[in-house]
Amino acid sequence: MSSSSLTPLPRVRVAVDCMGGDHGPAVTLAACRAFLAATPQADLLLVGTPEALAPAAHWPRVSIVHASETVLMDDPVEVALRRKRDSSMRVAINQLKVQDGAEPAAHVCVSAGNTGALMAVARYVLKTLDGIDRPAIATVMPNRRDGFTTVLDLGANVDCSAEHLLQFAVMGSALVAAVSGEADPSVGLLNIGEEAIKGSDTIKRAAELLREAAAKGHLNFHGNVEGDDIFKGTTDIIVCDGFVGNVALKTAEGLASMLGDMIRQEFTRTPFSKLAAVLAMPVLRRFKTRVDPRRLNGAALLGLRGLVFKSHGSADAFAFEQALTRAYDAARNRLLDRVHDRILDTLQALAAQPATDGPDDTAQAA
Amino acid sequence: MSSSSLTPLPRVRVAVDCMGGDHGPAVTLAACRAFLAATPQADLLLVGTPEALAPAAHWPRVSIVHASETVLMDDPVEVALRRKRDSSMRVAINQLKVQDGAEPAAHVCVSAGNTGALMAVARYVLKTLDGIDRPAIATVMPNRRDGFTTVLDLGANVDCSAEHLLQFAVMGSALVAAVSGEADPSVGLLNIGEEAIKGSDTIKRAAELLREAAAKGHLNFHGNVEGDDIFKGTTDIIVCDGFVGNVALKTAEGLASMLGDMIRQEFTRTPFSKLAAVLAMPVLRRFKTRVDPRRLNGAALLGLRGLVFKSHGSADAFAFEQALTRAYDAARNRLLDRVHDRILDTLQALAAQPATDGPDDTAQAA
């Protein structure tokens, strides 16, 4: 594939919405400082109010970009989109815009702001890539192979056509190829198994499209997978519609959190169990590190004419730094060009639709 | 509600497909023996081949019903439905049929056979209740309140209308009312949260129907919930379409299994961690008991003119016994009458559709 020969960027400029998330600058600035120390090839554009960014004014490899407003975690999409035009979120995304053919101010943008607002503003400011009807949200989940399964979409699209699922597969492949170096990552289509009716017509049609793309060498399609395959690591990528992906993600988060609390409760229930906890501490700590969801923070918004990464709103400095690193890695490995190239190649090969179709289809299926 | 005054059955007859599941009679007969000892008000109809059932021939409170064939775990639905007409699965379900107005031979049937076949055969033999378009599969998942959340549908229906989701809510309410004694259990509608687009049109319309039914006193509708609410125990019941429910269930199973294995790995990694494991054993064992999925084995097939419970195919004797107990409890508390009464009440109140509509709508939406 042409994009596999893309050379990494020598330096990467990351725009950071410093006001977003539950904790704002207290977390984002601490994370930026640690990230800068660990990542010498990165420069940061910190976006926020002058007061909030004052502590970072003289940091090396940092530019300050002022924004007078902040999108709150519970602001409706409309407020973020139409009223707060000078929000740190929007100004950070603005840094990705190519104007008059010049280099954009930043290669990638990171925000812990609310997902709905971030997707809407990013889509409005950046528009979608040629050949992409709808952007998608992709994240990684840990698996038994001590690796990660990339899952998309996670909530941007609730009713997906087979063509959308194909686009997600192509974008997910580009993402994994960019960050893991695996040239031909495998793709699974999330379906249900033995039960009465195996998948809807959309899923069946999507499987056909994916098989066709695989036959032409544009995807490594493994076939149908089920919910537990996320954690088995059966495939590098799992594609599904945003409703299903969101439910799977939230279900996994809820279960992990409940089990973690139950282990804690059992180890503090009696004096004996507290003693056992002390003795088992090194083992429990290693287990906790291994499954720490903060390490995997940073979801990619894919399919836009600019790279945007979304951090968990509740991220602490360690977690937000992981999102910065994830965004940096993707930008350095030219994820945007890879998605663009892969989509064009695949669509041209399939001749499923003209590759130069309008960039943004705002119609949502019922 | 009229059904809340239903008195429990004095004795319950349970038909058991002894040949189903990964282990067949080795597991099912052991479970039946333990169940009989623990449940004096139950009688069993054991269904299977003469050879397999020979050991149980002289057990008290047991009748033997012969069946010459067995539905295999990987048999396609068509084979179970059309070719193996004398399968233990089908013969067990046949025991629920009301013939010439007489009492059926059994009040409830339990099988560990493959889900697709079980649903198809049950639907074919029993037909759906008045007012139910499609039967659903309901199971319980553990929650933080040390209770259980009942989730349906889990895979019988991949494309559900708002009306189907309403029917699931009513059937789930009847199930929980029957087994927990809670007269008015709360219902949540599974949706996605803050993300770009909050739910599909079907979900929005379902929420309207559920609100309407709640306003008329026929449901305790809590509102939308998300995947993590399954484990928070936000509501007694969560309704969703079968595709989403199946993915949530499999995702949870996959994550729980991965985390369990990882704890085991960490506690056996070094001599020190093995020592820690010995000391922490009582605590770990209590944790394991608390989250043991075998305790929750036994999914209900709801909406049919007969009560069918499905055990996990891989169940051991302890797990299969739980499914028998769950089935027994439901039958004893007259779940079938409760579902029937609740559906009629709700549909009449909503006047959503004639309550005497055809019992079986075999058309599947695209």
Image: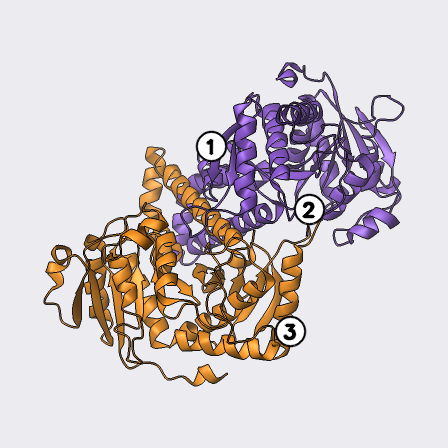
Chain colours: A orange, B purple
Number of other residues with Cα within 10 Å of mark 1, as a class: few under 14, some 14 to 19, many 20 or more: few
Output the chain of dot 2: B
* Mark nearer the viewer, 1 or 3: 3
Q: Amino acid at mark 1?
A: Asp
Observer-nearest of B146 and A121: A121
Position of residue B94 in the picture relative to residue A284 (left or right): right
- Which of the two labelled residues, at mark 2 and mark 1, occupies the earlier sequence position? 1
* Mark nearer the viewer, 3 or 2: 3
Residue B146 numbered tag: 1
Point out residue A206 in the picture as x, y percentages from the top left corner: 62, 64
Number of other residues with Cα within 10 Å of mark 2, as a class: few under 14, some 14 to 19, many 20 or more: some
For label 3, the residue is A212
Disc 3 to disc 2, C-alpha distance: 35 Å
Residue B313 numbered tag: 2
Point out residue B101 in the picture as x, y percentages from the top left corner: 86, 21
Q: Residue at x 63, y 44 (%)?
A: B160
Determine if marks 3 and 2 fall on one subunit: no
Observer-nearest of A67 and A288: A67
Determine if marks 1 and 3 fall on one subunit: no
The quarter of the picture where residue A207 lies is bottom right
Disc 1 to disc 3, C-alpha distance: 48 Å
Output the chain of dot 1: B
